[in-house]
Image: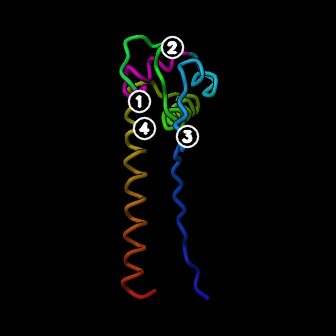
Amino acid sequence: MSKQDHILTVEVFDQDGSTFTLREICERGECHAEFVINLVDYGIIAPLEDLPEAGQWQFSVEALGRLRKAIRLKRDLKINLPGLAMSLELLDELDDMRREVARLNHRLRQLMGE
């Protein structure tokens, strides 16, 4: 019997279009609004619309996930904001490459008849 590797890729889709206000994303991320505003300033997360007043911002489920990842990196690795921006960009690229390699491996196995 041969062992087959399975790669499970999970993407979160928000079927009902849930959004979070600045206050709600801070509560769910367990962080201060100032931190979220700084993340927005550095392009790490983005509100759904570019509104001048931070109190009017709405954030997606994806932004909440990215906020939580940024919080973990900052806490565990003591990374500053520019470092967070670069780290998250590199992690996104790594995820994209892993998905592509998995897709290509799957396609290769199909072509080889496995």
Mark nearer the viewer, 3 or 2: 3
| Quadrant the N terminus occupies | bottom right
Residue at x 54%, y 37% (from the top left corner):
65
Q: Which residue is mark 1?
A: 44
Mark nearer the viewer, 4 or 3: 3
Please name whichever residue, 66 or 62, is drawn nearer the observer in this view of the structure.
Answer: 62
Which numbered tag is attached to residue 34?
2
Q: Which of marks 4 and 1 precedes in the sequence? A: 1
Q: Which residue is mark 3?
A: 16
Separation of marks 4 and 3 at Cα, in angstroms:
27 Å
Query: Mark 4: which amino acid?
Result: Leu
Q: Which of marks 2 and 4 precedes in the sequence? A: 2
Q: Which of marks 2 and 3 precedes in the sequence? A: 3
Magenta span includes 35: yes
Q: Which of marks 3 and 1 precedes in the sequence? A: 3
Query: Mark 2: which amino acid?
Result: Glu
Which structural element holds mark 3?
loop
Separation of marks 3 and 2 at Cα, in angstroms:
28 Å
Please name whichever residue, 14 or 2, is drawn nearer the observer in this view of the structure.
Answer: 14
Mark nearer the viewer, 1 or 3: 3
Instruction: Find the magenta span and give its range.
Output: 33-48
Which numbered tag is attached to residue 88?
4
Q: Are marks 1 and 4 in contact (CB under 8 Å)?
A: yes
Does residue 77 show up?
Answer: no
